[in-house]
Image (spheres, grey):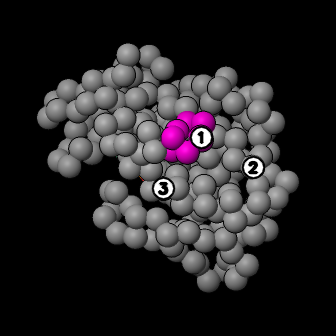
Amino acid sequence: MKYLEDMIRRYGEIEKGNILKVDSFLNHRMDPQVYKEIGKAFLRLFGDCEVTMILTIEASGIGIAAVTAQYFMVPAVFAKKSKTSNIGDDLYSAAVYSYTHRRSNTIVVSKKYLSTDDRVLIIDDFLANGQALMGLKSIVGQAGAELIGCGIVIEKGFQGGGRMLREQGIRVESLAIIDAMTENTVVFKK
Ligand code: 5GP
């Protein structure tokens, strides 16, 4: 998606450890035009798949999933990274290693909000090594729901998560795929 690539080129900041910061329009300050374009793009890609719910992981997936859910007119559910006291005990759970925080979390989703009848679109901001998506996929599997695919805003293609998931037969659609990153350049997949 050219619009997104232009935003990344213009406002993205490259940090140590192959981290791309897009805080000015996606991860901290949320630009409504960018969010709108993302929601519309996911609808163009998955709009004919009879999606019944959108699943993401806190925190940075939530805004993207909520806007996307408005285009699909279905609910969005986010996996929590800790078991809050009010969530109850009837939970699906999976272990996820966080690339940015360098620690493992158990993510949970209440069984009330995901069931065998659901056709699930997973949404996230970044795809790097694929740990977050693997955890979400496991939760969809535990519920006996159908995984329609994954919609990713920015895939770091050089980190292998996308390849691993596609090799498992999962449909992964990324709005921008980065082939390589140096200290001050981002190279997008053609
Ligand atoms: P994965 O589980 O695919 O290794 O990493 C995906 C998660 O890590 C995403 O949910 C995202 O929040 C975070 N992440 C991975 N790489 C980056 C990055 O370069 N920049 C930012 N802002 N987040 C990232």
Which kind of residue does numbered mark 2 sit on?
Glu
At which x and y percent is residue 113? 77, 62
- Magenta range is 165-172
Quadrant the C terminus occupies: top left
At which x and y percent is residue 10? 29, 24
Which kind of residue does numbered mark 3 sit on?
Ala
In the drawing, what numbered circle is on residue 169? 1
Q: Residue at x 59, y 40 (%)?
A: 169
Q: Is residue 151 shown in magenta?
A: no
At which x and y percent is residue 140? 68, 58
The residue most toward the right is 117
Q: Is residue 169 visible?
A: yes
How many C-alpha atoms fall within 10 Å of the one at disc 2: few (<14), some, or many (≥20)? some
Q: Based on the displayed image, in which of its 4 quarters is residue 70 positioned?
A: top right
* Mark 2, secondary structure of its residue: strand
Mark 3 lies on residue = 132
